[in-house]
Amino acid sequence: MDAPTRQVLEIRLPRGYQSSFYELPGERILESPWMTMHIQRSVQMPKTHVGWAAHREKKVIVGGLVSRVDPQAAGMQIRTGDSVLVRATVDKDGSVESVRPIHGRANEVAAVTKAVREWRYQPTLVDNKAAETECYVVVQFHVPGPRVRQ
C-alpha cells in the first residue's frame, strides 16, 4: 500500500450551517480484479457560533488511509453488479469505531463489514484538534473474466 497522504483543506462553512458532519470534497477509489471500492468521507465539525465569520473558516487536515483489509471472497457467490454500502465511524485516533450496514446481500455485507473494521487512518485534524470522521464505503463486485493466454 502506498504511503498515506494528508489532504489540507480550507473550508468556509455556509452561513447557518447546522450539521455536525461536513462532507469532504472528492472520493477515493480503490480497485482490485474483483471489486471497486468508493470511499466518501465526512468530518465532524466542532460546535461554533456560526454567526461569527471567524468561526466559519476551518482548516482541515484529512488523515490518509494507513492500512486496509480487503473483503474476502472465499465462500461468496459473487455476481457482477452486486454492491454493498456501509457507513463506518472513524475515531479521533484513526481507528474504525463502528461499521453499520446500509445495503447489500447478507454474506457480502458481512465480509465488507469485517474488512472495514480493520482499516486504520491517520488522525484527521480540524483547526489542529483531532476530529471524528465518517466514511461511506460502496463496494461494487465484478467477476474477473477468463485469462487470455498469449
Image (spheres, rainbow, N blue to C red):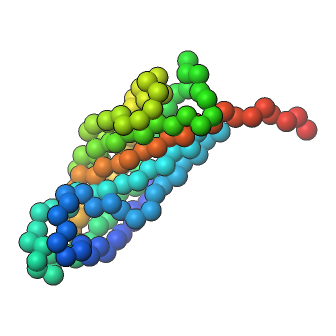
Rendering coords of residue 115 (x, y %): 43, 33
Q: Is residue 113 left or right of residue 146?
A: left
Residue 24 spot, x, y in % from top left: 35, 62
On the image, which quarter does residue 146 sit in? top right
Residue at 17%, 64% in the rendered image: 18
Observer-nearest of 1 and 20: 20
Image position, residue 142 (x, y; %): 63, 36
Q: How many marks?
A: 0
Outermost residue on the bottom side: it is 53
Left or right of residue 48, residue 12 in this image: right
Residue 149 in sight from this viewpoint: yes
Whether residue 130 appears in this view of the structure is: no
Q: Residue at horizontal 20%, vertical 60%? A: 19
* Residue 81 in picture, x, y percent from top left: 59, 37
Q: Residue at x 46, y 36 (%)?
A: 84
- Pick the residue in front: 91 or 24: 24
**On the picture, is 144 further left or further right than 30?**
right
- Image position of 122 with respect to 60: above or below: above
Quadrant containing the C terminus is top right
Left or right: where does residue 85 sit relative to residue 16?
Answer: right
Q: Residue furthest left?
A: 49
Considering only vertical position in the picture, is 80 above or below 138? above
Residue 101 position (above or below residue 93): above
* Residue that lies at the very extreme toward the right in this rendered image: 150
